[in-house]
Image (cartoon, helix red, strand yellow):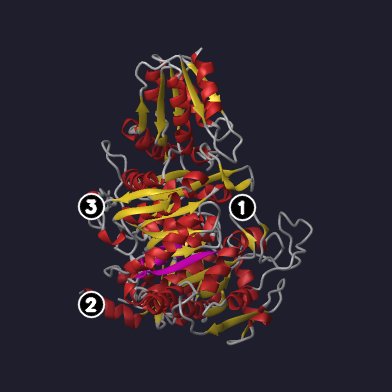
Amino acid sequence: MNEHCEYKDLDIQNPVLKALRQDRIPHIWCPGCGIGTSLNCFARALMDSGLNLDKVAVVSGIGCTGRTAGYLNLDSFHTTHGRAIPFATGLKLSNPELNVVVYSGDGDLFAIGGNHFFHAARRNMDLLIVCVNNYTYGMTGGQVAPTTPLGPTQTTMPYGNFEQSFNLPFVADACGATYVARWTAYHVRQLAKAMNEGLLKKGLRFIEVLCPCPTLYSRRNKLGDGVDQIKYYKEKSVIKNGADTKEAELTFQGEIIVGKFIDRERPTWLDSMNKHFSAALGDSFVPYGANGGDNGKN
Amino acid sequence: MKADTSGVLTGVHFMDGDHAACEGALAAGCRFVAGYPITPSTEVVERFAARIPKVGGVFIQMEDEIASSIAIQGAAWGGKKVMSVTSGPGLSLMMEHIGFAVCTETPSVWVDVQRCGPSTGLPTQPAQQDMQQVKWGSHGDYEIIALSPNSPQECFDLMITAFNLSETYRCPVFFMMDEVVGHMTERVVIPPADQIEITPRKFTTKAPSEFVLYATTQDDLVPEMVKAGDGYRIHTTGLTHDERGYPVMTVAVQQKMMTRLIDKIRNNVHKLVDVRTDNCDGADVVVVSYGITSRIAHAALDEARAKGLKVGHARLVICWPFPEALFREMASGVKAFVFPEINMGQMVRELNRAVAGKAKVVSVPHTGGTVHEPEVILNAIMEAAR
Amino acid sequence: MASETGEKKGKGTVFVKSELCKGCSYCTDFCPTDAIGFSKEFNQKGYHFPILTHPEKCSGCDLCGLYCPDFAIFGVRYKDLEEMRLKQA
């Protein structure tokens, strides 16, 4: 560590490193990219959760955010494009004691992987899904995403985007998620808290994190650097916990509604399966994954 | 080790191939299946859905075959033996995940009850048109194993072999049925659990600090495995990776990884030969077949022998890797091979390559929808024998 | 740094792993007490990395640590550092 002579005798490390694969840092993300900030918040949420981290697994798809799995010191799976959720579904159902987190980007989860999200939420699969929304495809060079708001230029929308974007909290709410929140890379404390809540809750929990992509979204649209985008989040965000998700639509550089929108209880897929088979099959049913798993709490 | 009794339905049954395949999987220790309905494979998952709650495990009907083919891989890393089941169009959707299973070395069994293509084709009628697709359909180079049963009894027996091979080699193993084998109902004998030999997963006994995810030795190119949740904190990826499972974007690491993935199968092709031969020694003509076509070939063989022809039969039980050496050797003793398949000539390409001009190779193609008329095969035998 | 120059200390300080910094300025811009600025020097990657320009203002709140996308900086309260010293000794 640095020039602090008076503490040279102390073995002092960034506490967040405990949750990361230190042999893989520095990461690949660009200067000013917000994914690292979201990962930082997640690492702290993990450490604050009190969970047995041997029982927490993270699954990512493909893309810039897809690299997240590789930096977390957990059982981590970097899967195929769009398929983190079905992989995570298999992992969770196979080993119900795991607390399974899907950590991926907006294009991965809602374009190529959209169908899987809808069904995982409908089934209330017991997963925490963190979606880093940077409005673009970063890894491939800044193409239009299902979350790009109307207006900004992307390489495949060279004259500005004319496609309607998804309002992700509304989608998650409509599909039945038990927890829905949106924060930005500006709201680090709230985000870390939401991630902590998400880790400790059951059912399909969804957290959208708005993050700057300075290289392929901000600069292309003359919005400055990463930090300028975070200043925009600071200026234009309105915290509305419990807001109607219908009203959480995002527009180009417009107002951003953030907060915890949904927090409700629904039986998970495994709980439903166990309850139903116990009733339907009686003693011939072999119960599976006691209580639908304890999500790493022991 | 011996099979776990909970999954073994010991007894004499009258069941179709799809159901027998399901029982084979249960007996082999499969405890997680993800699938999507598609004719003519659906009965496999229907039976699994009915049976698994009483055995202890999970069936989930996913939203599509793409999801099914990756959900099983998540489940394999969660510690279960896994299977997915599909047919032509569904298999096409699964292609990317064959490569993922190869790259991450995820033991998994993939059942393809073949129907006619291309596209939606003849959904309820038989074909053997996906034989090359499973070998070459996913991008990049890879080696897989494929088996082809010709009866409900073999759907049971060979399914156990399929699971055992997927654990031994840590690769996807394809179970290439067809509509007729899937839907024909016959006597199936399921032995007691203690007569069923099961290959357990090669779980490591090393401590987490000692364990390296993809470390292998020169003698054994198949790494040991762990399951998520046991404290090993593994990372695996479909990117080119080093022994730790970490992505490394260099030619050297690509070469090392690819060489091992290919060699762990190619170095063992001699162990992966299962060709059932009948009167091939001294034969002038050998009929080569697999799956349902092998049973049609029998009728043609009987007729040909009645006419005094010296005809042998070589049935491929393991189709991939193709038993090249066996046919290369056989080629020097016979005049011709006759190869009926319910496709326009797929595995016959492999036979041609193996025979390398040392004997005549006659393809007996079929556009699909039904099996060959035995006369067509007989005519080909007679033509070849001339 | 505060201790070396004998300047007035704040309630806390920051530690910087300068070689990890990519100069995004999240920490400098969002420091609630404006205690952090940029070094004149470059790190190996060619970025100016953060330093405590106003050590007397630092509360050790670690907001910089939470914002940093590169795990290059974190803040600690002196109180906690002294506790650590006692523990490690």
Q: Is residue A236 above or below residue B332?
A: below
Cα distance in 3D space between marks 2 and 1: 49 Å
Cα distance in 3D space between marks 3 and 1: 50 Å
Marks 3 and 2 in Cβ contact (< 8 Å): no
Q: Would you identify the image quadrant in which residue B322 lies? A: top left
Verify whether residue A95 appears in magenta: yes
| Same chain shared by disc 3 and disc 2 | no
Verify whether residue C62 appears in magenta: no
Q: Amino acid at mark 3?
A: Lys
The residue indicated by pointer 1 is A140
Q: Chain of mark 1?
A: A
Q: Is residue A71 visible?
A: no
Q: Residue at x 57, y 34 (%)?
A: B343
The residue lying toward the viewer, choosing from A25 and B136, is: B136
The residue lying toward the viewer, choosing from B66 and A58, is: B66
The residue lying toward the viewer, choosing from A88 and B87, is: B87
Q: Is residue B53 visible?
A: yes
- Pinpoint residue B149: horizontal percent, then vertical percent: 41, 41
- Pinpoint residue C42: horizontal percent, then vertical percent: 50, 58
Helix, strand or loop at mark 3: loop
Mark number, residue B2 = 3
The residue indicated by pointer 2 is C87
Q: Would you identify the image quadrant in which residue C62 lies? A: bottom left
Looking at the image, residue B9 sits to the left or right of residue B101; the answer is left
Residue span colored magenta: A88-105
Q: Amino acid at mark 2?
A: Lys
- Pinpoint residue C9: horizontal percent, then vertical percent: 40, 81
Q: Chain of mark 2?
A: C
Q: Is residue C14 above or below residue B196?
A: below
